[in-house]
Image: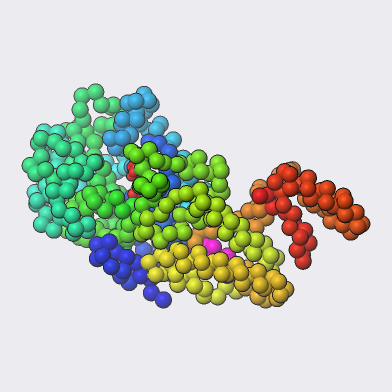
């Protein structure tokens, strides 16, 4: 099977061919770290984690070099530091750690490289110098600007006109620009700005613009031309368009061979976003739901489609995962099976078709259940292997069925195990009243006993 992905730049699905099958490079724009991430912000790391897993399956785990940056200098971070009186690094370290813990709870594998913008200011200055030298950029009164009219094919990724840049929220509208569509590469420090937001440069003290951060980090860690560049669809314009302008005008080489963008996660009919205030943080969701349920819910829609975030979506994701883990429990002891080529990889290789892949996963669970009903040892072992292989590709089924159903092993669990055994003993002794009493007592504390051919077990509900 070939891997086909929808390339935003080509506006169609293309067969994916890396430059070098031994070193496949992927860059995804990471978070601006100044507060808790909402579940919409978690969609890119989860979607591109699935892509990474598919690439790992094709090219080998060590062949994938995945960079996801941390934007730790930006106007919003400075504003947060001024408002709270905390140093910038205290804010960024705190929220980067929370972000990484949040996405790890969603079974996202840590990126190979996590560059922080503030660690790459010399590289940014170098690119800006090159752009000035080649006359793609100029020094103004408030900063250094990229001259958009100097690049004839500006806008080819998004198909948007340079004039649209004027409305870009992240683009300052300043008097000293030669053209309204020009964007900032370097911003001179203004009086009163915190010292930890200021760097020296050949043009004056200040800080880099947001777009140049990614151009510098991608080139330094992955090379001038990367295989796949990804991010949320709102980054297509102006962020990615501006990354292309900076990198390609400076280097004279194509920045990325494939561009992938995830659609929005909506809540209440609108894009979940901090500015609208319709957000629910990953941090809060994790207090109520296992991370795997959040991940499953995120993958129910195709990554390019919009996804409505509702309580119902979460409940359905939980129920489906319970059923799949239940099937896995029934075949768990039958190890040594062989995974066959299921439809999961095939669905994912068609532009990350996660809805079809999840449907196939549910089908594999039914198959495992049938094998368990028939007590067919070989089919049970293969059923287990198929479920685990599919789970690995999707980043699901990372717990043992026991961990999923009972939680971490505690004294509490040993007490429940003992109660379940006492009920088994009561039933053997035909003491139905006692057996029933134990079942009801456990049910009252949210524990359901499950009787099966292999004996009795339990789960928290
Ligand atoms: N509702 C959403 N659905 C999907 N992706 C989103 C959503 N909101 C933000 N993103 C993505 O999250 C990533 C992190 O972006 P960033 O930290 O800059 O947040 P943001 O865009 O400022 O969020 P907000 O729009 O809430 O202010 C980006 O790739 C962005 O495209
Ligand atoms: Zn970026």
Give coordinates of residue 323: x percent, y percent.
61, 60
Residue situated in front as seen by the camera: 439 or 4: 439
Looking at the rendering, which quadrant does residue 428 occupy? Answer: bottom right
Looking at the image, residue 325 sits to the left or right of residue 445; the answer is left
Looking at the image, residue 448 sits to the left or right of residue 391; the answer is right
Give coordinates of residue 143: x percent, y percent.
15, 36
- Tell me where the magenta segment starts and ends, as one range: 386-393
Looking at the rendering, which quadrant does residue 387 occupy? Answer: bottom right
Dominant secondary structure (helix, strand or loop) of the stretch shown in magenta: helix
Seen at 24% across and 51% down, the residue is 237
Tell me if I can see residue 411 in this picture: yes
Looking at the image, residue 117 sits to the left or right of residue 386; the answer is left
Is residue 204 placed above or below 419 in the rendered structure? above
Residue situated in front as seen by the camera: 346 or 89: 346
Is residue 95 placed above or below 373 in the rendered structure? above
Residue situated in front as seen by the camera: 403 or 134: 403
User: How is colour applied across the structure in the image?
Assistant: rainbow
Give coordinates of residue 92: x percent, y percent.
39, 36
Seen at 19% across and 58% down, the residue is 159
Seen at 34% across and 25% down, the residue is 83
Give coordinates of residue 415: x percent, y percent.
78, 45
In the rendered image, residue 426 lying in the magenta stretch gets the answer no
Is residue 329 placed above or below 161 in the rendered structure? below
Looking at the image, residue 429 sits to the left or right of residue 335; the answer is right
Seen at 36% across and 24% down, the residue is 85
Q: Quadrant of the N terminus?
A: bottom left
């Amino acid at each position: 099977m070939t891997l086909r992905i929808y390339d935003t730049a080509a506006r169609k699905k293309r067969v994916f061919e890396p430059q070098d099958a031994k070193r496949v490079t992927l860059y995804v724009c990471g978070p601006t770290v100044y507060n808790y991430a909402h579940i919409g912000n978690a969609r890119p790391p989860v979607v591109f984690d699935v892509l990474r897993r598919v690439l790992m399956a094709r090219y080998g785990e060590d062949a994938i070099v995945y960079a996801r940056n941390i934007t730790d200098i930006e106007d919003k971070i400075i504003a947060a530091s001024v408002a709270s009186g905390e140093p910038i690094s205290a804010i960024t370290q705190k929220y980067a750690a929370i972000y990484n813990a949040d996405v790890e709870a969603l079974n996202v594998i840590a990126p190979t490289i996590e560059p922080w913008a503030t660690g790459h200011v010399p590289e940014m200055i170098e690119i800006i110098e090159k752009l000035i030298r080649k006359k793609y950029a100029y020094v103004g009164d408030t900063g250094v600007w990229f001259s958009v009219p100097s690049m004839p094919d500006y806008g080819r990724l998004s198909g948007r006109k340079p004039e649209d840049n004027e409305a870009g929220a992240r683009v300052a509208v300043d008097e000293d620009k030669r053209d309204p569509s020009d964007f900032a590469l370097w911003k001179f420090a203004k009086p009163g700005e915190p010292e930890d937001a200021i760097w020296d440069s050949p043009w004056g003290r200040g800080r880099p613009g947001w777009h140049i951060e990614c151009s510098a980090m991608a080139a330094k860690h992955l090379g001038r031309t990367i295989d796949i560049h990804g991010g949320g669809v709102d980054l297509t314009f102006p962020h990615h368009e501006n990354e292309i302008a900076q990198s390609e005008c400076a280097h004279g080489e194509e920045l990325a061979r494939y561009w992938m963008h995830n659609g929005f996660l909506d809540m209440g009919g609108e894009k979940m976003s901090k500015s609208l205030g319709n957000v629910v943080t990953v941090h809060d969701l994790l207090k109520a739901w296992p991370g795997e349920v959040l991940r499953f819910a995120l993958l129910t829609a195709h990554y390019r489609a919009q996804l409505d975030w509702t309580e119902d979506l979460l409940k359905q994701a939980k129920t489906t995962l319970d059923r799949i883990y239940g099937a896995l429990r029934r075949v768990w002891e039958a190890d040594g099976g062989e995974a066959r080529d299921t439809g999961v990889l095939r669905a994912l290789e068609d532009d990350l078709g996660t809805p079809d892949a999840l449907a196939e996963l549910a089908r594999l669970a039914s198959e495992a259940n049938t094998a368990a009903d028939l007590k067919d040892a070989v089919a049970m072992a293969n059923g287990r292997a198929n479920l685990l292989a599919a789970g690995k590709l999707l980043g699901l089924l990372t717990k043992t069925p026991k961990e999923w159903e009972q939680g971490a092993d505690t004294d509490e669990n040993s007490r429940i195990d003992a109660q379940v055994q006492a009920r088994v003993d009561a039933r053997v002794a035909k003491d139905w009243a006692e057996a029933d009493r134990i079942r009801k007592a456990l049910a009252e504390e949210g524990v359901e006993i499950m009787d099966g051919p292999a004996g009795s077990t339990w789960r928290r509900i």
